Image: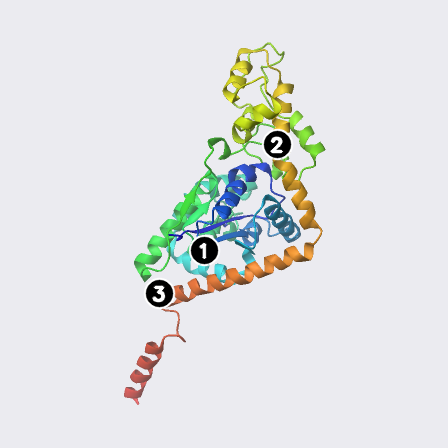
């Protein structure tokens, strides 16, 4: 039974990087090609990006095409799935407004993702005592509600996303339950679909810092040239105690090994490093001492180049016809809007705000006033 409805999205704040790729994009393409779904939607979350970039609309605008090109270059295929732009679907904003009635301020304040993001963005500056200080824009504070609208508008059952999105899905499920219990069965509870490989949940940046992110300048982008890719891999953080080759090396926090866990497959040894049978043996040698950083970096570099070269090539092809990429987004947005409008009809009916469609209401009111005459 193909009853799954898959939906996920990305904020257009920069080009997508290999953290997005292992954590999400690769899995999406596999899902897309497995064709085991009723419908699949992938969208560019520009309205969400504006919640913390409202003063920089040009950045969001410029990155729509970048993200779309990244989507196409990894193999997302608009002939199989619907790719759209969030802000082109006004129903999403409409839904979010009604969901706001179902969520308390206290509940939003408990959302761990929102908490860390507020701190990261310095929104609490004006009132250092509290995370939710007076400098926090309401739009940003409430974006988990808007995300619940994104998901439920399409009756999504399955949301492929990273660990950091778990609190968003949990909050969405709560909104769905509350909505359905008050207004009657209308919305569908989604489930998060986490990436299979553990190392993929949170790929660190090349500097070994917490997470790969544009603002930290520690990304390897999907569209990286072969040259820059090689340079970035060579500059990666490894083990500061591994000074000479013969020193025992540590794997913990060693970015090169974290990336190998995420990207290395058995066949890569035969292709690029035949003197080792597998990753465990490579790790053991590194830990014993006698294996240099340059060797493991070169190995990783070859693996990444093999993975990224076809993506880079495909991107070049799509870059030749940019108007067609916008056209694809427009068509996707039209289709998405039809689906969201159907859900909005259901919601209006359940919430009893479908006045003009409600023949019974009009008849009753007419009858009431006729009797009074
Ligand atoms: N919050 C997600 C991110 O930052 C983007 C997003 C917006 C999303 N709406 C969504 C993801 C709905 C999955 C489902 O990456």
**Does 7 sit above or below residue 201?**
below
Q: On residue 149, which mark appears? A: 1
Q: Is residue 257 visible?
A: yes
Residue 350: give its label.
3
Question: Left or right: 239 with respect to 143?
Answer: right
Q: Looking at the picture, how far across and down is residue 134, in whole percent?
A: 51, 47
Work out which residue is located at the far left of the displayed protein and give it. 371
For the C terminus, the image quarter is: bottom left
Instruction: Choose the circle earlier in sequence order: 2 or 1.
Output: 1
Q: Is mark 1 on a helix, strand or loop?
A: helix
Mark 3 vs mark 1: which is more N-terminal? 1
Dot 1 crowding, Cα within 10 Å, few <14, some 14–19, many 20+: many
Q: Mark 2 points at which residue?
A: 304
Q: Residue 237 carries which label?
A: none
Question: Disc 2 vs disc 1: which is toward the camera?
Answer: 2
Q: In this view, does 358 lie above or below 302?
A: below
* Distance Cα–Cα, label 3 vs label 2: 51 Å
> Closest to the observer: 143 or 222?
222
Q: How crowded is mark 3: few (under 14 residues within 10 Å), some or many (20 or more)?
A: some
Q: Position of residue 216 (x, y in %)?
A: 61, 35
Q: Do the residues labelled 3 and 2 touch (CB within 8 Å)?
A: no
Tell me the CA gap for discs 2 and 1.
Answer: 36 Å
């Amino acid at each position: 039974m193909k009853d799954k409805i898959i939906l996920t999205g990305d904020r257009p704040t920069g080009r997508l990087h290999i953290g997005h790729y292992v954590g999400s994009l690769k899995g999406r393409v596999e899902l897309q090609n497995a064709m085991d779904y009723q419908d699949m939607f992938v969208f560019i979350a520009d309205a969400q990006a504006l919640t913390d970039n409202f003063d920089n609309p040009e950045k969001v605008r410029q990155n729509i095409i970048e993200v779309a090109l990244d989507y196409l270059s990894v193999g997302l295929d608009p002939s199989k799935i619907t790719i759209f732009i969030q802000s082109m679907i006004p129903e999403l904003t409409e839904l979010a407004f009604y969901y706001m009635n179902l969520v308390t301020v206290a509940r939003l304040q408990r959302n761990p993702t929102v908490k860390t993001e507020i701190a990261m963005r310095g929104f609490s500056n004006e009132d250092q005592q509290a995370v939710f200080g007076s400098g926090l824009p309401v739009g940003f504070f409430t974006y988990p509600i808007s995300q619940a609208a994104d998901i439920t508008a399409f009756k999504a059952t399955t949301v492929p996303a990273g660990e950091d999105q778990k609190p968003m899905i949990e909050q969405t499920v709560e909104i769905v339950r509350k909505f359905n219990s008050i207004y009657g069965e209308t919305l569908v509870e989604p489930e998060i679909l986490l990436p299979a490989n553990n190392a993929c949940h949170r790929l660190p940046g090349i500097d070994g810092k917490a997470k790969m992110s544009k603002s930290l300048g520690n990304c390897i982008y999907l569209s990286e040239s072969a040259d820059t890719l090689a340079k970035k891999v060579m500059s990666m953080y490894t083990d500061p105690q591994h000074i000479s080759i013969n020193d025992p090396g540590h794997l913990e926090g060693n970015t090169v090994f974290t990336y190998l866990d995420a990207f290395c497959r058995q066949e890569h040894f035969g292709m690029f490093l035949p003197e080792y049978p597998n990753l465990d043996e490579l790790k053991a040698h590194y830990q014993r001492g006698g294996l240099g950083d340059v060797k493991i970096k070169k190995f990783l570099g070859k693996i990444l180049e093999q993975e990224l070269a076809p993506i880079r090539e495909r991107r070049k092809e799509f870059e030749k016809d940019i108007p067609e990429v916008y056209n694809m987004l427009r068509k996707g947005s039209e289709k998405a809007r039809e689906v969201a409008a159907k859900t909005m009809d259901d919601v209006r009916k359940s919430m009893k705000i479908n006045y003009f469609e409600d023949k019974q209401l009009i008849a009753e009111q007419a009858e009431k006033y006729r009797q009074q005459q």
